[in-house]
Image (spheres, grey):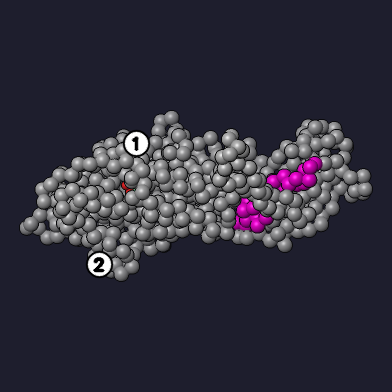
């Protein structure tokens, strides 16, 4: 998959926000599996992504 | 410290634990059973368990206890007494559901609540595991249906601890099954939407589960207490009874014992027909001392069982609708439970899903794990993961603040050079989440358009092949293949990445716990400067 080139008339700004993303829904996730446990320990022990990825 | 995984069904139970090489193993009891019947029988002073107990159903049904799991934590008025009409009958024991069995003529009858039977059952499972592992087992992860009530969990928990097993965690059966299925080749890292359909002996359960970033979310569940292997047994028993009647002019449905023999023969034939195309049926003294010997082929069985098998397929379709999804949204259907060994069940289900949906069952996928073992395996996987956590952490990990998370209602991604939608985060992705991808890029200044994805259905018509003979009329309908595709929808932001000198860009989408989406892109080389921006939600 490839990205397109920047159109010539884009302007000097690097980032243009135009809309917010659609409202999310809150749902319970299943407390199982290693990715969930990594999520839980990041949240509980305040670990960051990079610490977890080490 | 040894933790085992337990699948505790109304019909069978299984135990699993990591073997020496770390792979998960389903443990057989001393009789060699891996799907251990959830049954206890009392004959005189002796207690029998598993298949040995089940063997008493024909001669001693009133002292054989089966189908007790769903009675845990329920009152007698609430349960279906027909579940025990061919075995020790469920009754009210001081507000709980229980059974009364004779342990000898001159002795007082033994009264056991469902909870007490469960203690005895779990003790037997624990002993089988310890016998095999040669170590004492302390803890367990037990899989339970998604609709088990708090009262049911409480009774099961206390039964386990009376049996000497600490329940480290209860996990839901479909999630356990999915963990086991995805543990092979770490399939969990691929975002997919699954239907987990579990066809047991007395009930059928199904769940739609999305996996995003390795995390599982249950989108819908369904339960049917009137659908399961027992219904297939009824259909096949009736078929055998008719054959017998035709031949001998004797009705073999008149006594409990001959009905039990019919069911026994039906189960055996069904299981045989899952593997081979004919099964012999052989019943000694079915009625009035007459033996019955016959055989049945798979096709005949499938006709006999057609209604029940069709209901099972409908049940799977219904849970997809309940999740507000289309069959096109389902990547895989994982078939679980003993009945899922039935080839016709799997092929019927394949027929209602598009070709792009994989149906996982022994008859459709030679690498599939035995469907009756998936739940115990998954429970054991979770149990071994939890060995690294202490009780407090395990409890905290299940607290509402951790498990109630936000899920995207639309996919988010980028617009590619051809105007196509490049999915980065699928709908139902749960955050916090971080996703990294590498995309091809032109040199110079590059545009990242961040958009939501809009679903469209693409229909491709495959014309039937032209008949070879010109005169021959082809009645083949053109086949229409439907596919769900995403196209760019609402534009969220545009990000310019300037003076790119490499052929690719590393792109990171990150959504924080608070819901801020940040997108950054940089050249994949040391010291490159990221270009980035942030988007929030409605
Ligand atoms: N090889 C097989 N082919 C067909 N049916 C099978 C096979 N093995 C087991 N079964 C059937 O599967 C059913 C038991 O399924 P399972 O072991 O998943 O039960 P369970 O989880 O205890 O179910 P429930 O709680 O609904 O009773 C029985 O009806 C049994 O006859
Ligand atoms: Mg089950």
Task: Identify the subunit bearing mark 1.
Answer: B
Residue at the spot 31% in from the left edge and 38% down from the top edge: B278
Mark 2 closeness class: few <14, some 14–19, many ≥20 residues within 10 Å: few
Q: Nearer the viewer, residue B188 or B195?
A: B195
Judge from the rendering whether residue B190 lies leftward or rightward of residue B224; answer left or right.
right
Q: Which mark is residue B195?
A: none
Residue at the spot 72% in from the left edge and 44% down from the top edge: B422
Residue at the spot 29% in from the left edge and 57% down from the top edge: B68
Q: Quadrant of residue B35?
A: top left
Q: CA distance from mark 2 to mark 1?
A: 44 Å
State which quarter of the image contains the C terminus of chain B. bottom right
SS at mark 2 in the image: strand
**Segment tinted magenta in the rendering:** B401-430
Residue A8 forms part of the magenta stretch: no
Q: Which mark is residue B92?
A: 2
Q: Nearer the viewer, residue B185 or B249?
A: B249
> Residue A7: horizontal and vertical position, in percent?
89, 45
Judge from the rendering whether residue B13 lies leftward or rightward of residue B318; answer left or right.
left
- Residue on which the image places disc 1: B276
Q: Quadrant of residue B274?
A: top left
> Residue B399: horizontal and vertical position, in percent?
52, 57
Judge from the rendering whether residue B89 lies leftward or rightward of residue B528; answer left or right.
left
Task: Identify the subunit bearing mark 2.
Answer: B
Q: Is residue B537 above or below residue A14?
A: below
> Residue B374: horizontal and vertical position, in percent?
42, 43
Q: Is residue A21 above or below residue A53?
A: below
Q: Is residue A18 visible?
A: yes
Q: Foreground mark, 2 or 1?
A: 1
Judge from the rendering whether residue B396 lies leftward or rightward of residue B440; answer left or right.
left
């Amino acid at each position: 998959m490839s990205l397109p080139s920047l159109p010539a008339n884009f302007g000097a700004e690097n980032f243009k926000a135009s809309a917010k993303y659609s409202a999310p829904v809150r749902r319970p996730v299943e407390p199982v599996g290693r990715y969930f446990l990594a999520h839980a320990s990041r949240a509980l022990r305040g670990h960051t992504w990079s610490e977890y990825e080490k | 410290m040894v933790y085992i995984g337990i699948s505790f069904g109304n019909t069978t139970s299984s135990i699993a634990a990591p073997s020496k090489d770390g792979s998960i193993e389903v443990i057989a009891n001393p009789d060699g059973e891996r799907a251990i019947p959830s049954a206890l029988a009392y004959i005189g002073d002796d207690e029998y368990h598993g298949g040995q107990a089940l063997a008493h159903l024909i001669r001693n049904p009133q002292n054989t206890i089966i189908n007790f799991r769903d009675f845990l934590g329920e009152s007698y008025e609430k349960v279906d007494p027909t579940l025990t009409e061919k075995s020790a009958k469920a009754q009210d024991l001081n507000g709980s559901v229980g059974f009364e069995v004779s342990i000898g003529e001159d002795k007082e009858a033994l009264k056991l609540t469902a909870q007490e039977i469960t203690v005895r059952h779990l003790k037997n499972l624990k002993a089988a595991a310890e016998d095999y592992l040669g170590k004492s087992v302390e803890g367990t992860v037990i899989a339970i249906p998604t609709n088990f009530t708090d009262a049911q969990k409480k009774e099961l928990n206390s039964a386990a601890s009376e049996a000497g097993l600490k329940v480290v965690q209860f996990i839901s059966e479909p999630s356990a099954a999915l963990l086991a299925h995805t543990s092979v080749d770490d399939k969990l890292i691929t975002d997919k939407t699954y239907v987990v359909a579990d066809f047991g002996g007395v009930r059928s359960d199904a769940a739609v589960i999305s996996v995003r970033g390795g995390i599982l979310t249950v989108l819908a569940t369904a339960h049917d207490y009137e659908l399961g292997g027992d219904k297939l047994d009824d259909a096949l028993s009736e078929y055998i009874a008719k054959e017998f009647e035709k031949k001998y002019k004797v009705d073999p449905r008149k006594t409990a014992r001959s009905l039990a023999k019919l069911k026994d023969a039906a189960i055996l034939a069904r299981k045989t027909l899952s593997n081979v195309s004919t099964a012999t049926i052989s019943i000694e003294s079915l009625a009035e001392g007459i033996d019955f010997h016959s055989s049945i082929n798979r096709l005949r069985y499938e006709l006999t069982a057609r209604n029940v098998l069709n209901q099972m397929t409908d049940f799977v379709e219904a849970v997809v609708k309940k999740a507000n999804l289309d069959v096109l949204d389902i990547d895989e259907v994982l078939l679980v439970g003993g009945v899922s060994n039935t080839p016709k069940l799997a092929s019927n289900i394949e027929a209602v899903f598009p070709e792009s949906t994989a149906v996982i069952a022994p008859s459709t996928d030679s690498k599939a794990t035995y469907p009756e073992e998936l739940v115990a395996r998954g429970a054991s996987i979770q149990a071994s993961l939890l060995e690294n956590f202490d009780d407090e952490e395990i409890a905290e990990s299940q607290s509402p603040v951790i498990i109630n998370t936000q899920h995207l209602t639309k996919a988010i991604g980028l617009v590619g050079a051809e105007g196509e939608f490049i999915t980065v985060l699928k709908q139902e992705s749960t955050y916090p989440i971080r996703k990294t991808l590498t995309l091809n890029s032109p040199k110079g200044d590059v545009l990242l358009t961040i958009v939501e994805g809009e679903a469209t259905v693409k229909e491709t018509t495959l014309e039937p092949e032209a008949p070879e003979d010109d005169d021959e009329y082809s009645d083949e309908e053109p086949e229409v293949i439907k596919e769900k595709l995403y196209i760019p929808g609402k534009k969220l932001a545009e990000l310019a990445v300037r003076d790119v000198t490499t052929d690719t860009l590393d792109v990171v989408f990150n959504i924080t716990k608070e819901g801020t989406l940040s997108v950054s892109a940089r050249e994949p080389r040391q010291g490159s400067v990221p270009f980035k921006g942030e988007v929030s939600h409605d």
